[in-house]
Image (cartoon, rainbow, N blue to C red):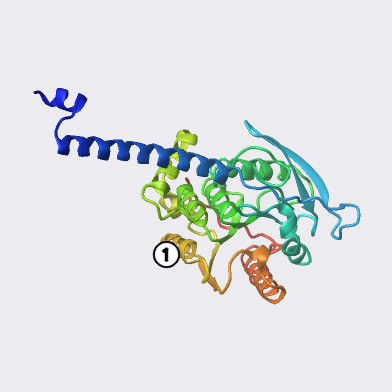
Amino acid sequence: MSIVDELHYPSRWYTKLLIVILAFVFFALLATVVISGVLTYWIVKPQRTSSEINMASFPGRPDEVDFAIAGLGSRRGWFFPGFRGAPTIVLLHGYESSRGELLTLVSALQDHQYNVFVFDFAAHGANAGVTTFGYREADEVRAAIDTLAKRNDVDAARFGLWGYNIGAYAALREAEKDPRVRALALDAVYDYPRQMVKIGVEKTGVGGFPMVVKSAQMCFAWMNYQHMNDPPLSAKLSGMAGVPMLFIQAADDPELGSITREVFLKAPEPREQAIIAHGNFVNLPDDEKREYENRVVTFFLTRLPVTQAAGTTPAAKSAK
């Protein structure tokens, strides 16, 4: 009897066992793919949080600013004016957060005469869509900067960016090709968006099952196939020489903290590192939040002053 016939009509015990094992492996792989696909969908469609506030009564006299992103539709952000002609700090929220959760940091920066701008990424706040963990979010940052640079009350050539996880990745990705970005504060930055997919899967509690993380990362890569060959952020860091960067890592977030440290070590000067006890700015207790805000404000005051001395020009970035 041939091997094919034996597999079709098993008569020996070991052939029957082999077929059972193969069937088990097949259905296990199928279940893994299905579970990973569902998990990936849940991860890229986070539960949105409301960021509605009464603009008329909010201190700081914010303006609503609309801008459009090719292929993603329109966004509405809040512009908080500072000293006329001052640089603008764009604050970029993290995963499952929103612009409304950054208002205390907005106030801390505006109190020092900076213009400050906040908006919600895709799949966050009132915006539909899915998150790409930084790929397309960097396009949103570029569109915001382009719109703000057209105003006559800001310094169109000097922007600072602060971001947390998704916001940090998008900030650095944009800064690597935008000479208008003159200072960066990066909290929990990562090198590849797939690293955030892994963290998202692990938070569901099923990350320990074989192949689930890898399968979810493959699903995410397929969803963002146009970026499949994009290099890590650290590959282009050498072009950031002369642009001050503050890297913030949290002791209670060892995975992202470790990745942030690796990116920090690859960054050129001038660079700074801040290690804090607890991560996720929006959930910090009041005393830690004030300390955090003071650290960020001090960085921008030192590295991106509100006014420039006459006749000075900020160091330009190296050609990309």
Amino acid on which disc 1 is placed: Leu
Up-down relation of residue 141 to residue 296 (above or below): above
Using the image as rendered, state which of residue 201 and residue 56 is in the foreground: 201
Q: Is residue 266 left or right of residue 92?
A: left
Using the image as rendered, state which of residue 311 and residue 152 is in the foreground: 152
Q: Quadrant of the N terminus?
A: top left
Judged from this view, the residue extending furthest toward the right is 56
Estimate the x, y position of residue 141 in percent, counting from the top left: 63, 45
Up-down relation of residue 210 to residue 288 (above or below): above
Q: Is residue 150 left or right of residue 256?
A: right
Q: What is the number of callouts on the image?
A: 1
**Measuring 15% from the left and 22% from the top, which residue is drawn there?**
5
Estimate the x, y position of residue 31 in percent, counting from the top left: 42, 40
Up-down relation of residue 18 to residue 271 (above or below): above
Up-down relation of residue 189 to residue 120 (above or below): below
Using the image as rendered, state which of residue 127 and residue 239 is in the foreground: 127
Residue 229 shows up from this direction: no
Estimate the x, y position of residue 257 in percent, counting from the top left: 48, 65
**Measuring 69% from the left and 62% from the top, which residue is drawn there?**
308
**Measuring 69% from the left and 52% from the top, which residue is drawn there?**
98
Q: Which residue is mark 1?
A: 265
Q: Residues within 10 Å of mark 1 (few under 14, many from 20)?
A: few
The quarter holding residue 297 reads: bottom right
The quarter holding residue 9 reads: top left
Secondary structure, mark 1, is helix
**Measuring 63% from the left and 42% from the top, which residue is drawn there?**
140
Estimate the x, y position of residue 235 in percent, counting from the top left: 41, 50
Residue 204 shows up from this direction: yes
